[in-house]
Structure formats: structure tokens, C-alpha cells
């Protein structure tokens, strides 16, 4: 059974930083692209970032977070991370970790339907 558990969220002031973590289990972690999505109150789920399988040599970011967020993975620990920097109030959302449904590829890494495993989310609130 696929299990994803996020942690690291919290309340932070604008301009601050957080590091989100996602612990994976129940599948061969190295073989799958991993993504982060977020959902703000009253809005749909938004793609944030994706990292390729294996060594994670390729990463993609939504324009809204490019240059401020960094995705990474540690296959030895079955963990994926999202470093959030220079946070803005509009980054406030519930952040979800997700596992792509296809081994070693993705049909559309920006589309939530491409992912078949989700965590419960970790809340990030950016406010002064």
C-alpha cells in the first residue's frame, strides 16, 4: 500500500523559509517521479513542482514558485523535500506530496490525475 506522509508545515512570516518533507513507503521509491501540489482555501489543487525518478536530475517548477522553491529527493531514505524560501502570503495553502502513477516517466507531471498516491497534506501559512 502506497503511503505518503508530509511534515514541516507551519506559520511563517513573509520572506521566511520552511522545509517540507514527505516520507514514502509501499512502493519502489527510486522508480517514480514525485510531485508537490498545493491547495489554498476556496481554490483548486495547484501543481507546484516535480522531480524525476532515480537521481532526480530534472526538476520542474510552477512559474509562481520558480526561483523560490527547491525540490529534492533522498532515495536512501525514501524521502522527497520541498524547500520554500522568500515565502509570500499567496503561498498559504495545504501542501501535498504525490507519487506519479507511471514508473520512470510521466504523461503530464503538472496534472494531478497523473498521480495515484497522495499524502494527507501539511499546512503552510504565511502571515505577519
Image (spheres, rainbow, N blue to C red):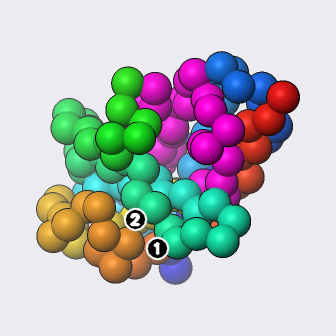
For residue 99, the mark is: 2
Which segment did they paint magenta? 68-95
Q: Position of residue 91 (x, y in %)?
A: 60, 43
Look at mark 1 in the image and give the residue it sits on: 117
Most foreground residue, 15 or 6: 15
Find out whether the residues at labels 2 and 1 contact each other: C-beta distance under 8 Å. Answer: yes
Does the magenta portion include 55?
Answer: no
Point 15% across, 70% down: residue: 107
Please indicate whether residue 76 sits to the left or right of residue 90 in the image: left
Secondary structure under the numbered disc 1 in the rendered image: strand
Please indicate, yes or no, whether residue 119 appears anywhere in the rendered image: no
In magenta segment, residue 81: yes
Q: Is residue 79 visible?
A: yes
Q: Tell which of 127 and 26 is nearer to you.
A: 127
Q: Residue at x 43, y 37 (%)?
A: 65
**Residue 64: horizontal and vertical position, in percent?**
41, 41
Q: Estimate how packed mark 1 is, as few (under 14), some (14 to 19) or many (20 or more) residues with alpha carbons within 10 Å.
A: some
Quadrant containing the C terminus is: top right
In percent of the image, x 35 and y 62: which residue is there?
A: 28
| Residue at the spot 61% in from the left edge and 44% down from the top edge | 90
Amino acid at each position: 500500500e502506497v503511503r505518503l506522509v508530509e511534515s514541516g508545515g507551519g506559520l511563517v512570516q513573509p520572506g521566511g523559509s520552511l522545509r517540507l518533507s514527505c516520507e514514502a513507503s509501499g512502493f519502489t521509491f527510486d522508480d517514480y517521479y514525485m510531485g508537490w501540489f498545493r491547495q489554498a482555501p476556496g481554490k483548486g489543487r495547484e501543481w507546484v513542482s516535480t522531480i524525476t525518478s532515480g537521481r532526480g536530475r530534472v526538476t520542474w517548477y510552477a512559474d509562481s514558485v520558480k526561483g523560490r522553491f527547491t525540490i529534492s529527493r533522498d532515495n536512501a531514505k525514501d524521502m522527497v523535500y520541498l524547500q520554500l524560501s522568500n515565502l509570500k502570503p499567496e503561498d498559504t495553502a495545504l501542501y501535498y506530496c504525490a507519487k506519479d502513477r507511471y514508473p520512470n516517466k510521466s504523461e503530464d507531471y503538472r496534472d494531478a490525475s497523473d498521480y495515484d498516491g497522495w499524502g494527507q497534506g501539511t499546512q503552510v501559512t504565511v502571515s505577519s
